[in-house]
Amino acid sequence: MRMDAQQTLEDLPIEFEGPSYTGDTVFGYLVIAVSLIVLIIAVLIIIFGPEYVSVSIARGPTFTQFWQLYPGPIATVAGIVTQLGWMLVKKQDEVLSEEVLDRVRRLLPASAEMPEGHRFVLTHLTGHRYRVELEEVVEPSDQQNPPDNVGQIVPLGRGGAMVRLCHDQMMATAASSG
């Protein structure tokens, strides 16, 4: 079965390959790792560093002396760079999520009628493998309170089904908008 060909609801569950992490994501995690190491070293120097630092006027501070002289600004810059790395990773995760949802929109026909009392479930399996399936909706009991505003809701095709994508759990569910 071709992955880019449209499927029917009877073909569900469908497993497909989604996008994989890009170089920007790997770079983001590398920036985070390096900046966290710098941040930890700077904080340790702030806590356990020397009370006085002697610097040669003729030669200036050595690399170690520079760290001992300015651990606060170094820690501040490392914290800012760490946040920039997280922003880059988060942006790439959003791009990956959009690409997965676009792949699902291409797989399922927009005119498909979702059976009453069912929803789509998009599950991240491993690596860049995903599965779309149809499951029966079980109404929660009065004792169970479903979490409020979990995930991002996006439209799935012109048919009106909505997909709820939960980034932190790598799972998405879709409820009929009818």
Image (spheres, rainbow, N blue to C red):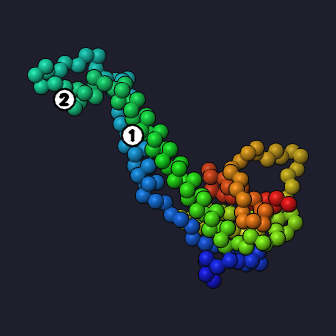
User: Taking 56 as reference, is 150 left or right?
Assistant: right
- Give neighbour class at mark 1: few <14, some 14-19, many 20+ (Cα, 10 Å): many
Between 112 and 55, the one lying in front of the other is 112
Residue at the bottom extreme? 1
Q: Does the image show residue 128? A: yes
Q: Amino acid at mark 2?
A: Thr
Q: Is residue 147 above or below residue 115?
A: above
Q: Which residue is mark 1?
A: 35
Q: Residue at x 70, y 77 (%)?
A: 7
**Which element carries disc 1, helix, strand or loop?**
helix
Residue lying farthest to the front in this orientation: 158
In the displayed structure, 69 sits above or below 38; it is above
Q: Is residue 40 visible?
A: no
> The C terminus lies in which quarter of the figure?
bottom right
Left or right for 44, reference 170: left
State the residue at coordinates (68%, 50%): 151
Q: Position of residue 52 (x, y in %)?
A: 25, 16
In the rendered image, the quadrant that contains the N terminus is bottom right
